[in-house]
Amino acid sequence: MRTAPVDIGGAIVPNNVFCAPLAGYTDFAFRRLCYSYGAGLCFTEMVSAKGLKYNSEATRALLHRHPSERDTAVQIFGSDPDVMRAACESEDLADFSVVDINMGCPVPKVFKNGEGSALLGDMPLAEKIISACKKSGKRICVKFRTGISEDKKVTAEFAKMCEGAGADLITVHGRTRDKYYSGEPDYREIAAAKRAVKIPVIANGGIFSDADAEKMIAETGADGVMVARAALYDPHIFAELTGKDAPRDIKRDVLDEIEDMLPFYGEKFTLVQMRKMTAFYTKGLRGSAEYRKRLFAADSISALYAIIEEIFPE
Ligand SMILES: Cc1cc2nc3c(=O)[nH]c(=O)nc-3n(C[C@H](O)[C@H](O)[C@H](O)COP(=O)(O)O)c2cc1C
């Protein structure tokens, strides 16, 4: 696709191919990989504003950054405007100049708390949250869906509200909460959001190839795309979409990720995470089903290294 820089409230991001926030996946090691293949901007996974308020160590670990990392955006979620603003102003977020607010998460635990996609049904509260966060002085992005249910889509109206409340950029995931992650994205709704506002609009949903990205831009007029699940299977998709000359080397990527993770997470969590990631990355390789079985049986980092050597012999 044709790339272009994106202006987020005066901060220029090098290109308009973003890596989505993905809970359980988009940590510092994975983001480094995505940047190396050309992603213009990566996001942390969703971080609870309440978790930060109550000093949760597990929540804080999600904010860890790679020493080489550029200006990654942090995504926060919550439903209390004061708590959300306090999170933006906290020391924890001092290193992040761009804050993304999650207004799309469909998960019942989040939805029932009035957070994530529940805010699509309470526009006045969503507006209060955005303007409270804006008062922190951070650049504010909002990521939302087209509505809670298929019979009540609110995309353009919600986009306008975000802009009016001070958002510097919006990302529209072209599906309703009811649809979770299935089905085609609703191009018409994303296009309506794009027409409704002047701030940059990033389109998300169902982008698994350069052709998908081209189609998304052509159908919606959006300023850029955000890739989510496709990046888990193949972070090289960022090179495909941006044209960056960065050949894929899965073995090197896996070994680099392990090396990044070990000192921060320790062996136990690194093993759990990298069994999962390696299984994603090797999907589609010859014999991958058998490798997956063996990967999940690996009970130490050295067993994991041994399987990696077998999958990718020199
Ligand atoms: C495992 C998983 C975790 C996700 N975590 C988040 C998250 O933390 N924050 C968020 O805004 N969206 C999250 N999403 C939604 C994605 O960012 C994205 O909007 C969605 O997957 C649609 O894009 P895709 O069709 O390219 O996968 C998650 C999706 C998946 C599958």
Image (spheres, rainbow, N blue to C red):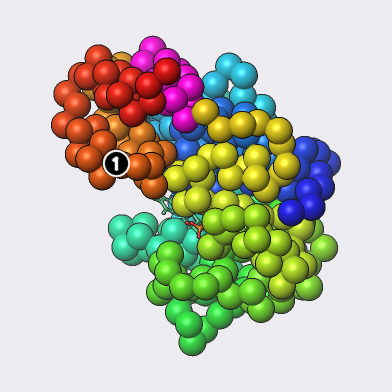
Q: Judge from the rendering whether residue 102 lies leftward or rightward of residue 17; answer left or right.
A: left
Corner quadrant of residue 173: bottom right
Residue 79 position within the rendered picture, expressed as x and y whole percent measured from the top left: 47, 56
Q: Residues within 10 Å of mark 1 (few under 14, many from 20)?
A: few
Residue 183 position within the rendered picture, expressed as x and y whole percent measured from the top left: 46, 73
Q: Which residues are magenta?
A: 250-263
The kind of secondary structure element at disc 1 is loop
Amino acid type of the residue that numbered disc 1 sits on in the rendered structure? Gly
Q: Judge from the rendering whether residue 217 lies leftward or rightward of residue 73; answer left or right.
A: right
Helix, strand or loop: magenta stretch: helix
Q: Nearer the viewer, residue 107 or 270?
A: 270
Q: Which residue is the site of mark 1?
A: 287
Vertical comparison of 209 with 67: above or below: below
Q: Indicate whether residue 252 is drawn in magenta.
A: yes
State the quadrant of the N terminus: bottom right
* Residue found at the very far bottom of the displayed protein: 151
- At 62% from the left and 19% from the top, the residue drawn is 68
Q: Nearer the viewer, residue 285 or 14?
A: 285
- At 73% from the left and 48% from the top, the residue drawn is 16
- At 33% from the left and 20% from the top, the residue drawn is 309
